[in-house]
Image (tube, rainbow, N blue to C red):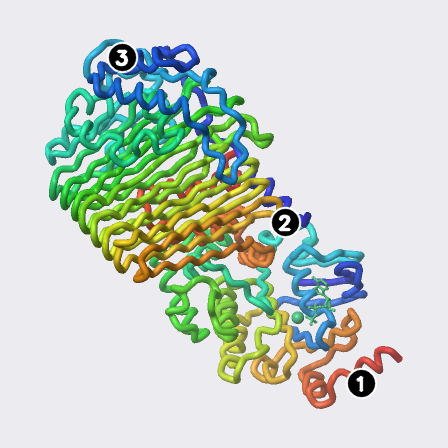
Amino acid sequence: MSATTETIEQLIDHGYVAGFVTNIDAETFEPGLDEDVIRRISLIKREPEWMTQLRIQAYQDWLNMVPPDWAHLKIPAIDFQTISYYSAPKKKGDGPKSLDEIDPEILDTYNKLGIPLEEQKALAGIAVDAVFDSVSVATTFREKLSEAGVIFCSMSEALQEHPDLVRKYFASVVPHKDNFFAALNAAVFSDGTFVYIPPNVRCPMELSTYFRINESNTGQFERTLIIADEGSYVSYLEGCTAPQRDENQLHAAVVELVALGDATIKYSTVQNWYPGDEQGRGGIYNFVTKRGDCRGDRAHISWTQVETGSAITWKYPSCILRGNDSVGEFYSVAVTKGLQQADTGTKMIHMGRNTRSTVVSKGISAGKAHNTYRGLVRIARRAEHARNHTQCDSLLIGDRCGAHTYPYIEVKNPSADVEHEATTSKISEDQLFYCQQRGLDEEAAISMIVNGFCKEVLKELPMEFAVEARKLLNVTLEGAVG
Amino acid sequence: MLSIKDLHVSVEGKDILKGLNLEVKPGEVHAIMGPNGSGKSTMAHILAGRDGYELIKGSILYQDQDLFDLSVEERAQRGIFLAMQYPVELPGVNNMTFLKESMNSIRRVNGQDELDAVAFMKLVKEKAALVELPEKLLKRDVNSGFSGGEKKRNEILQMALLEPKLGILDETDSGLDIDALRVVANGVNALRSPQRSMIVVTHYQRLLDYIKPDVVHVLANGRIVRSGGHSLALELEEKGYGWILEEDAA
Ligand SMILES: Nc1ncnc2c1ncn2[C@@H]1O[C@H](COP(=O)(O)OP(=O)(O)O)[C@@H](O)[C@H]1O
Ligand SMILES: [Mg+2]
């Protein structure tokens, strides 16, 4: 191995900044899963009977399902009886959450992560739902949003306050039988975010959820449901971190988006779950089902993700392009290093006429990591003049990592226009030498080249997030954190 | 400024430089000529600190400091600039961003304030005009899809911005038409000052017509085998390298 490769690998070896633990009193279920556990979760949340039944049904079906094994991942067997399915910080009182009722330790946690929950300190123009382990601990700017008719609250509250809306759309995009992890999620989900944008409203702020796993031995199973009614617009951001622990933790979320006619949903994720250490100990197993349904004509759903964390990532944010002239987009940067594994991509299901989809995937691998892009483009028989363009690029740092690309294309309508381009490149010693000869140190050089490689994706992120994402890429790849 | 003594370097077990000596004083411009494969780029890379070369023996002092104690970027930060024979493409990296980062990282370590966007823009436009680099190339990715001539002009633009103490040009004139050649020469001449030295590696005497070096050296058999004035370059143009190699062998 050349001197340059060695230094690159040293640089990649970095500390995980979000790896601290918050000491709080929590109410945590004993590990284990059976019908009784599910009924207890449902009871704590005072859910309507139909939801309890839906959970039980999902659990029954899950018992007969097996984990997916088709991904390019080595997944150790997960013992679902060793996981606790509910953990919530103990509340000082009951009733509505106001900030002064939240444990200061939790507020402090979010401050440390750079997400102050006090509205006066918050980033201008961004409302936050903070989910800590199994529950939502705070949702900011709710009043301001409700003036515009926007509903932004935790899933638990939505079930109390807007049960009809929830019932109408819940599991309508990702039915519980969709896959093993979606079924598990439907059975045990504890909280998440609910968003409803009324017709012709442009949501006045960016909405965001920040997921934090804190307790050990717990899984996080949240559920996000976003409905953009006709002619509305919303941009939503999702961030996540977890403490550094030696054991693996499971995160199995479901995200459902519904865009009605002429509505637009932009969904951005910066995923920074704990990736495990150099020996591959610990880290989050991230098995997430994300799907958007363009349910009306000219609906538009755009997924942007920057995935830098997790020991294992299994995730395929998808679009069902049901409405005529609807548009689906997927922009992704996935970084794997050390022993991380990622199998991620998208599905674009074209059903309506003149539907269009764009996929831009940038995979970066370093160390001994494996990074897989898996994408499906399906053009249904009646989808006249559907178009897809897929661009899938891999960047390798060092010579022990791997990049894999699995495009699946199913075209049932001859008028379709489907393009797939793929490239694999390496950061060359020539490039590094060139940058260094111009006075940049190696970190700055790698950062510049990596940011250049990801440019098309990063420009899709809302501005505040793009800055964060760039910082995260630098930290992830360059050990900038002392 | 620069003092190379008895430099022996090999690449993959093959001896390339075999006892090279070179003294460059502040303000001097030295031309290095020599047959293909004689080790001119090797010497330029060694000065810039590129790895992959094995130092067998010898020393290089740059401003009275042992050059081998410095990393690639430290040398750059202390004023060594290499215009490369084959400039590298950086896809996705905006040329302007790259120039600004480069310039500011050098300014930072030298205790100067970073240039703000406005001051930088003004400077870069001025220098781009000097090297006749179309402004649209500033907005493109570094060297990506640039023609050979555009890449070389971009190198000279960087040199003009960074104002090095020791500028090394490795065949910057190769493959250029006469107009581009004049641009490169102007770039070099504009930077000429009593404090600044240049090493210009070239195959062609015509560049030297414009630059007028203080000394011309012939690098062959891994050493400087002959040094002289501008007339040496004219003689080489006329007679080739054969006679020098023969004299050297004798
Ligand atoms: N990386 C390398 N690996 C093997 N041989 C090399 C390498 N770099 C240069 N050489 C050899 O070293 C000799 C000198 O090359 P170079 O310095 O590029 O010559 P010049 O610039 O004078 O044409 C040539 O024989 C060339 O083939
Ligand atoms: Mg050469």
* Mark 2 and mark 1: Cα distance apart in space: 42 Å
Q: Residues within 10 Å of mark 2 (few under 14, many from 20)?
A: some
Circle 1: element type: helix
Residue placed most toward the observer, B101 or A29: A29
Total label count? 3
Residue denoted by label 1: B243
Circle 2: element type: helix
Badge 2 sits on which subunit?
A
Position of residue B57 relative to residue B27, above or below, is: above
Residue B134 point in image, percent of width and height: 40, 73
Residue B12 point in image, percent of width and height: 76, 59
Amino acid on which disc 2 is placed: Thr
* Mark 3 and mark 1: Cα distance apart in space: 96 Å
**Residue drawn at (27%, 60%), measured in percent from left and top?**
A385
Q: In the rendered view of the protein, which quadrant contains the N terminus of chain B?
A: bottom right
Position of residue A75 relative to residue A363, above or below, is: above
Residue B170 point in image, percent of width and height: 62, 70
Between disc 3 and disc 2, whose residue precedes?
2
Answer with left or right where residue A410 lies relative to residue A476.
left
Q: Is the CB atom of the residue marked by disc 2 within 8 angstroms of ligand 1's nearest atom?
A: no
Amino acid on which disc 3 is placed: Ile
**Residue drawn at (48%, 48%), measured in percent from left and top?**
A447
Q: Is the CB atom of the residue marked by disc 3 within 8 angstroms of ligand 1's nearest atom?
A: no
Residue denoted by label 3: A44
Instruction: In the rendered structure, find residue A118 and report the number of the disc placed on it.
Output: none
Q: Nearer the viewer, mark 3 or mark 2?
A: 3
Residue placed most toward the observer, B1 or B67: B67
Residue denoted by label 2: A4
Badge 3 sits on which subunit?
A
Position of residue A90 relative to residue A21, above or below, is: above
